[in-house]
Image: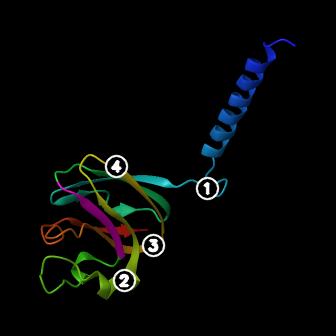
Amino acid sequence: MSQAPIPRRRGCVATAVLLAALVAGCGSSQPAGTSARVVDVTEKDFHIAMPTTIASGEIVFHVHNAGPDDHEFIVMRGTAAQLPLQDDGLTVNEAGVKSRLVGELEPGSPGVTRNLRLKLAPGRYVFYCDMTGHFMGGMHEDVVVQ
């Protein structure tokens, strides 16, 4: 028997494994025929830069932390003025408005970009960071979803 076919079989197996991995990586949790809109967001002390009017439906928020600190990205129904503060006066009392929570990203480091996929119905939403003092420092944006 010749040894030549063995390396070729290994090459075929490696190619098959690679193709299977590529096909699996191309999968999507999104139903066929639908596409989410991408909304770019930049977080920086003490500001969130994003559109203030967004079309309703499935949206992927592409959130970039321009630093210099870690930042959360929290989405609640309502407006910033409607959010109650903790006794410290520096952070939002999230337990008091948990039922209005739509989605969130845990704190991200400076320079990191994260994605949050949400399906938003028409209404008013507030997007904010609740790291100590950030909300009170102005790190929130009221958005109308139409």
- Please name the amino acid that badge 3 sits on: Pro
Question: First in sequence: mark 4 or mark 2?
Answer: 2
Q: CA distance from mark 4 to mark 2?
A: 25 Å
For disc 2, the marked residue is: 98
Question: First in sequence: mark 4 or mark 1?
Answer: 1
Question: First in sequence: mark 3 or mark 4?
Answer: 4
- Please name the amino acid that badge 4 sits on: Thr
- Please name the amino acid that badge 1 sits on: Thr
Q: Are marks 3 and 1 in contact (CB under 8 Å)?
A: no
Q: Crowding at label 4, few (<14), some or many (≥20) Cα neighbours within 10 Å?
A: some
Residue 71 covered by magenta stretch: yes
Q: Nearer the viewer, mark 4 or mark 1?
A: 4
Figure quadrant of the N terminus:
top right
Mark 3, secondary structure of its residue: loop
Q: Are marks 4 and 1 in contact (CB under 8 Å)?
A: no
Above or below, 25 against 6 in this view is below
Mark 4, secondary structure of its residue: strand
Q: CA distance from mark 3 to mark 1?
A: 18 Å
Q: Which residues are magenta?
A: 69-76
Quadrant of residue 19 within the rendered picture: top right
On the image, the x and y values in percent for residue 117 come to 47, 60
For disc 1, the marked residue is: 34
Q: Nearer the viewer, mark 3 or mark 1?
A: 1
Q: Crowding at label 1, few (<14), some or many (≥20) Cα neighbours within 10 Å?
A: few
Question: First in sequence: mark 3 or mark 1?
Answer: 1
